[in-house]
Amino acid sequence: MWLYYRKNMIRARPIAACKSVPGAAAARLRQRRLTRLQALTIPPAALPGSLALTYTRCGKPTCHCAQGGAGHPGWQLTFMAGGRKRVERIPAAWADEVRRRVEAGRAFREAVAEVFALNAELLVLERRQRPPTARRRAGARGR
């Protein structure tokens, strides 16, 4: 399986290379993970963050927004970049396309989170099935 990320091609480890945990529950988890990974593709035009319709006041004393109106509508894309929150104004004509791209980014992020959760559940099953290791006594360090 090949993953494309930032113009670099990365060879992903095959599922079979991971330690195989025996049992029906582990088999179901591995099958869910495999199905999810096979359907997982990085959308090339996906966007992070959220798109929201906001209302702002223009500051003109004769405008309807200064008289207690709702303000002027405008779309904003809010996202994190470089550890900082960014807010970009989006033209109204672009709103539908940007919304689709944000939803694609959110779906990809949720799919990756699901694969991570399945990996964690498999790790827990592996740990439960592993025989307990003998623990050393606290006073036996220097011997």
Image: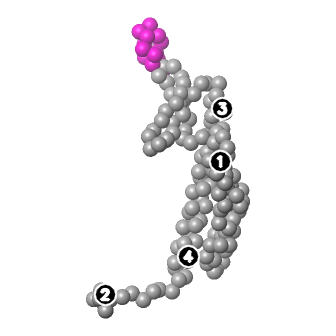
Whichever of labels 3 and 2 marks the residue nearer the N terminus, that label is: 3
Viewer-side residue, 93 vs 142? 142
Name the residue that disc number 2 marks: 141
Q: Secondary structure at mark 3?
A: helix
Whole-angstrom CA distance, mark 4 to mark 2, is 31 Å
Q: CA distance from mark 3 to mark 2?
A: 65 Å
Most common secondary structure along the magenta stretch? loop
Q: Are marks 3 and 2 in contact (CB under 8 Å)?
A: no
Question: Type of residue at label 3?
Answer: Asp
Callout 3 crowding tier (Cα within 10 Å): few <14, some 14–19, many ≥20 = few
Residue mark closest to the camera, 4 vs 2: 2
Tell us which disc is closer to us: 4 or 1: 1
Residue indicated by mark 1: 7
Q: Earlier in the sequence, mark 3 or mark 1?
A: 1
State which region is magenta.
57-70
As for residue 18 lying within the magenta part, the answer is no
Placement of 99 over or under 140, stated as above or below: above
Identify the image quadrant of the C terminus. Answer: bottom left
Mark 1 Cα-neighbour bin, 10 Å: few <14, some 14–19, many ≥20: few
The part of the image, by quadrant, that contains residue 29 is bottom right
**Disc ID at residue 125:** 4
Residue 107 in sight in this render: no
The residue shown at (60%, 40%) is: 47
SS at mark 2?
Answer: loop
